[in-house]
Image (cartoon, rainbow, N blue to C red):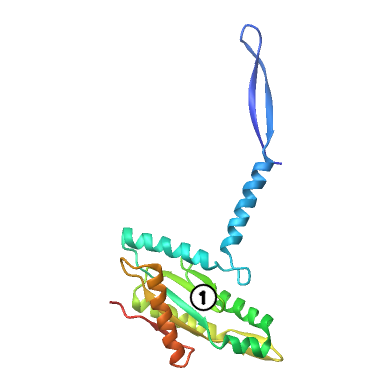
Amino acid sequence: VPVSARVLPIRDPDGTVTGAVEIFNDNSLQVSARQKIEELQKIALIDPLTDLGNRRYAEITLRSRFDELNRYGWRFGVLFIDVDYFKQINDTYGHLFGDRILRMIGKTLANSLRSFDVVCRWGGEEFLAVIVNVNVRQLNTIASRLHALVEQAGLPQDDRMIHATVSIGGALARPGDTMEALVHRADEQMYKCKLEGRNRFSIAPEV
């Protein structure tokens, strides 16, 4: 049980220390309350389906990256990732299987990024990856790798393997940018992929 202790000296009438007494204070309630707060904070930032950060966590991460960009000039970009034909997957195989597809894609994305990059579930069948220390060419390379790895992943269903694909749009953050403007540019590139047939990626050119 978590406790704290203080040692108090015992003195005789002349002031000479003749012994000591140790006073214990049980602070388990304080520790328990602090742990509960930390757990609640963690829950508030985690998507329960995929165990990735949720949209709130993505927004907190983006604000931190923008602070670094504006203070130190550290470049970063985002990848807006949307699962292709997700409604069709749900309608054909059911929502539970659709959830499994989202978990599989989330794990594939998370395991394929560098330790200092972050991928979150933005909402529904959308994911957002925050990629640090990159230029347009490097962001293209990372998007290409994620696109290919998701396409190769699959889940067994009715004696066959079901695959899903994603459309990925990306953009680099600019000095003076806003979170909304950056995500919008990446979303536009993702929508362009949808119009061109899905299962592809596109990165906004650097201005």
Residue 125 is drawn in which quadrant?
bottom right
Looking at the image, how many numbered discs can be counted on the residues?
1
Expressed as whole percent of the image width and height from the top left, the position of residue 61 reads: 46, 63
What amino acid is found at the position of numbered circle 1 in the picture?
Phe
Expressed as whole percent of the image width and height from the top left, the position of residue 91 reads: 65, 89
Residue sitting farthest toward the top: 14
Q: Which residue is mark 1?
A: 127
Image quarter of the C terminus: bottom left
Expressed as whole percent of the image width and height from the top left, the position of residue 20 reads: 67, 20
Expressed as whole percent of the image width and height from the top left, the position of residue 58 reads: 49, 66
161 sits to left or right of 131: right
121 sits to left or right of 25: left
2 sits to left or right of 59: right
Residue at image coords 40%, 81%: 188
Q: Secondary structure at mark 1?
A: strand
Residue at image coords 62%, 88%: 89
Residue 203 sits above or below residue 1 on the image: below
Residue 38 sits above or below residue 76 on the image: above
Residue sitting farthest toward the left: 207
Image quarter of the N terminus: top right
Residue at image coords 68%, 80%: 96
Residue 89 sits above or below residue 68 on the image: below
206 sits to left or right of 199: left
Q: Nearer the viewer, residue 158 or 39?
A: 39
